Amino acid sequence: MAPNRPTIRDVARQAGVSHQTVSRVINGSEDVLPETRAMVEAAIEDLGYHPSAIARSMARGSTHTLAIISPNLTDYTFASVIEGAEVEARQHGYFVMSSSASDPQAFRELVDELVGHGRVDGLIVINPYADERYKLIPRDFPLVFVGARSHDEKICSISLDDERVAYEATRHLISLGHTQIALVTGPMTEDCSQDRTGGYRRALSEAGIPFNKSIVFEGDWSASSGQAALVALLEHGLPPTAVFAQNDRMAMGVLHAARDANLQVPQQLSVIGVDDMPLSSYFDPPLTTMRQDMPQIGQEAIRMLMSIIQKKNVDLQGIKFPAQLVIRQSTGKGGGSSSG
Amino acid sequence: MAPNRPTIRDVARQAGVSHQTVSRVINGSEDVLPETRAMVEAAIEDLGYHPSAIARSMARGSTHTLAIISPNLTDYTFASVIEGAEVEARQHGYFVMSSSASDPQAFRELVDELVGHGRVDGLIVINPYADERYKLIPRDFPLVFVGARSHDEKICSISLDDERVAYEATRHLISLGHTQIALVTGPMTEDCSQDRTGGYRRALSEAGIPFNKSIVFEGDWSASSGQAALVALLEHGLPPTAVFAQNDRMAMGVLHAARDANLQVPQQLSVIGVDDMPLSSYFDPPLTTMRQDMPQIGQEAIRMLMSIIQKKNVDLQGIKFPAQLVIRQSTGKGGGSSSG
DNA sequence: ATGAAAGCGCTAACAA
DNA sequence: TTGTTAGCGCTTTCAT
């Protein structure tokens, strides 16, 4: 804390008015004579006065601060959501504290500090986990979930339309003639992975392709898990003609393993990911992927939260965003067995 | 704000003691009879009481909150610093608000809100810019700079030892026999780029290799700028045998351009980067790079800041961290003209 | 249009 | 060991 910041009373004394008048000036009240206002402003300038956000929060009973809790800050998708949210929050005059909680214990502590201790007016949880973590948050506290299904009628959630995104990615592969389509999922404890797996199965099913459990691998979103998946697939003598990796990093791992195995992409193997991270077009070959607009999701989450805080009618229970197929060079014609 | 949170007085009433006794209990004071404490704790539990962080800040005159301002949240290196800082701050019982300010104007506003309005007790600025931005921050406010030189005797700074990192990267190339070593820099408005360029020149100079301005390109840290650099180099008929890209993303762009030009890496062109981001070992070929430990830098920054806040003797004016050469497959023997 | 008084929820003296 | 009295810096009545 800067030592001895001038207070509203110092300004008042200097300007020869009451502290209340100073309060009016800094809050843009109309009921102040222009000349009075000028004096006060001069004093403010002179003293280098800044209102104390803490004292304001104290007196007003609200902090004008929001929090975002995400599993980590380094994952590009999370960071993008946060950045989008931050920009939007600032537009509304709110601040956001972004913190990460990698495990349930840290999550609990964070919620306690942030919500329990009244540091924030609202909370956004980027929560990929299909657990009941939300129960840790006091009901009726302004809350928006990002990236997970709403497990409760009364909780607003917003996410990518994971089922559809996966459906479309798989459709793309199928339309190219592939029928042996391996799947590399994220951790199945996450809603996102479950939904994407659902979309994959629906596309397969609609195309009359049987679901083959032996070519489905659970990864952890990392490149190395994608690599391991393809290695395992090849070792087991189950070479697919295409792989749908549920994110770009794992797709990159698949590409890497394909190189090691001297498999030509896309001639011998097609690969599609999800995210379209900035580096995806620099992969070798450039990756076909489902592009999602994470900052927009962050922005929308803040808008929702603002509505809730301002007690506007919030009928928006669960919003799902689409993603866009970006065709690059990692996917190409497959087997040639298709026709229905 | 949760409606009607119970206060210290509600607890006092319920427990039949004074509010001050409640305060003692929640602050772990020794001077409370065990039985009194038990009563108070029961009341706290019963009412679901949580102390208000705002009121505490108000009464104590400090917020126990720190801020980190970085140019953005999505850059992997920044995010890693922030994550490391967060973990360390929590150990000290502090919170951190991380915000991004992409331009000087946003930076000014953020400083105003965060520092001017007394929201935080200390500030970490991840500031790659070689400008005088620090002057916007009140002198004597606890401040630590990350990633930039200290332009003022009284400001603590902490960063990678950019000069040395670049020196070592260049040495690696030289030791492989390269003499035509192109350089792709970050924006030259950043300290980091300047220092890395300095290290590159020193290594060249020590090896008796003349500095050739025509094979130096200014990029912007993006993969596309790295790609553009190599394309330009080739167009101008100045094919180097090696490229030192000042970060991994640009190195990836160089790799991409090399592929497009049918240049074999590392047989015809060696490429080295800086960072060792998680994906670097998945590039094609896996990238040789200088690994830096960003979370550690964040951690150290917090420690420094805590020292300053606690008015401990802070002689640590500027700490510089080393980086570690990680040799993968993007660098190999060069021209063969070297000998001294 | 301006001022005076009270209070937000807590901590920090000081008393008892 | 516990309670009482004052603030922290501001906003919010209610007067004037």
Image (spheres, coloured by chain):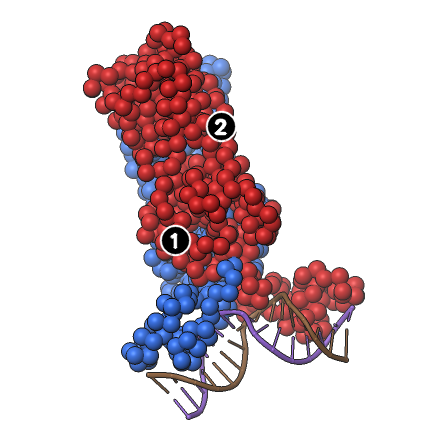
Chain colours: A blue, B red, C brown, D purple
Image height of B128 relative to B242, above or below:
below
Residue B90 vs residue B176, the one in the foreground: B176
Q: Quadrant of the C terminus of chain A?
A: top left
Image height of B15 relative to B287, above or below:
below
Q: Which mark is residue B136?
A: 1
Could you tell me which chain the residue with mark 2 belongs to?
A: B
Could you tell me which chain the residue with mark 1 belongs to?
A: B
Residue shown at the point (36%, 41%) measured from the top left: B130
Disc 1 residue type (three-letter): Leu
User: Badge 2: how crowded within 10 Å, few (<14), some, or many (20+)?
Assistant: many
Residue A326 vs residue B206, the one in the foreground: B206
**Does dot 2 land on a helix, a strand or a loop?**
loop
Residue B284 location in percent, x, y? 38, 19
User: Badge 1: how crowded within 10 Å, few (<14), some, or many (20+)?
Assistant: few
Q: Which residue is mark 2?
A: B323
Residue B243 location in percent, x, y? 34, 20
Residue B162 vs residue B38, the one in the foreground: B162
Residue shown at the point (34%, 32%) measured from the top left: B186
Residue B247 location in percent, x, y? 38, 29
**Does dot 1 land on a helix, a strand or a loop?**
helix
Cα–Cα gap, marks 2 and 1: 31 Å
Residue B246 location in percent, x, y? 37, 28
- Residue sticking out furthest to the left: B236
- Position of A34 with respect to A251 (left or right) is left
